[in-house]
Amino acid sequence: MSATPGKLLAQAKQGDPKAIAALMNRSTQSKGISVKASLKERCLQVLFEGNVVPHQGKTMEFVQDGMAKLQVEAVDRVKVYGRQVGQETPVWQDEMVLASSNPFDEEADELDLGMEDYDDPSAISDTDFPEPPVGADSFLEQDVEPGFDEAMDNHYDEHYDEDFDDE
């Protein structure tokens, strides 16, 4: 996927999970955390993986802030998983319904039925998250949109300078 930074942001806003993960990785990689994402039936699944398990509350704040800035219409909810590098099973999982989604949507019942396999964290494996395309790392070194990258970095710096131990 060869794209300009502006195109990457546009792809993320359209719900492209690879683009969303690339944007999140720009803020998390310096903290030793990698992000992988997958989109299934309007549910974005995001895996945060580090040598130290990412802090659940702070990671959820980061995801919520990022998704609010992106305003992704193709995503109704986000499932977030945190695990340590080398482990197969996430240490924690959490879920959020995005403000832009309609909780009374008739398709919501179908969505819940379609996501049964993902209620079990062990159902998520590396094969569920495609590897980033060749050249994706170049996105990590480019500005996406004036202010967006700084805002995400500042948020992550403010909330992740301390240890990731549970409170």
Image (cartoon, rainbow, N blue to C red):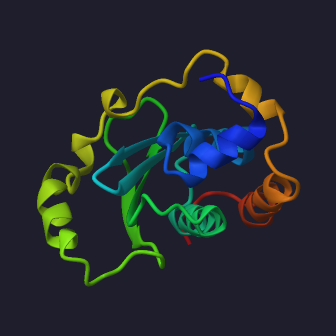
Q: Is residue 122 toward the left or the right of residue 61 in the image? A: left
Residue at image location 37% in from the left, 46% down from the top: 39
**Quarter of image, res 151:** bottom right
Residue 110 image offset from top left, x and y in percent: 14, 64
As rendered, which of 53 and 62 lies closer to the eye? 62
As rendered, which of 67 and 74 lies closer to the eye? 74
- Relative to 159, residue 45 above or below: above
Residue 51 image offset from top left, x and y in percent: 57, 37
Residue located farthest toward the top when viewing the structure as drawn: 134
Residue 119 image offset from top left, x and y in percent: 21, 57
- Relative to 77, residue 99 above or below: below
**Quarter of image, res 57:** bottom right
Residue located farthest toward the bottom when viewing the structure as drawn: 104
Residue at image location 66% in from the left, 22% down from the top: 2
> Total label count?
0
Q: Is residue 87 toward the left or the right of residue 122 in the image? A: right
Q: Is residue 11 toward the left or the right of residue 42 in the image? A: right
Looking at the figure, which quarter contains the N terminus?
A: top right
Residue 91 image offset from top left, x and y in percent: 38, 51
Residue at image location 63% in from the left, 38% down from the top: 22
As rendered, which of 18 and 36 lies closer to the eye? 18
Residue at image location 11% in from the left, 61% down from the top: 113
As rendered, which of 76 and 61 lies closer to the eye? 76
Looking at the figure, which quarter contains the C terminus?
A: bottom right
- Relative to 72, residue 96 above or below: below
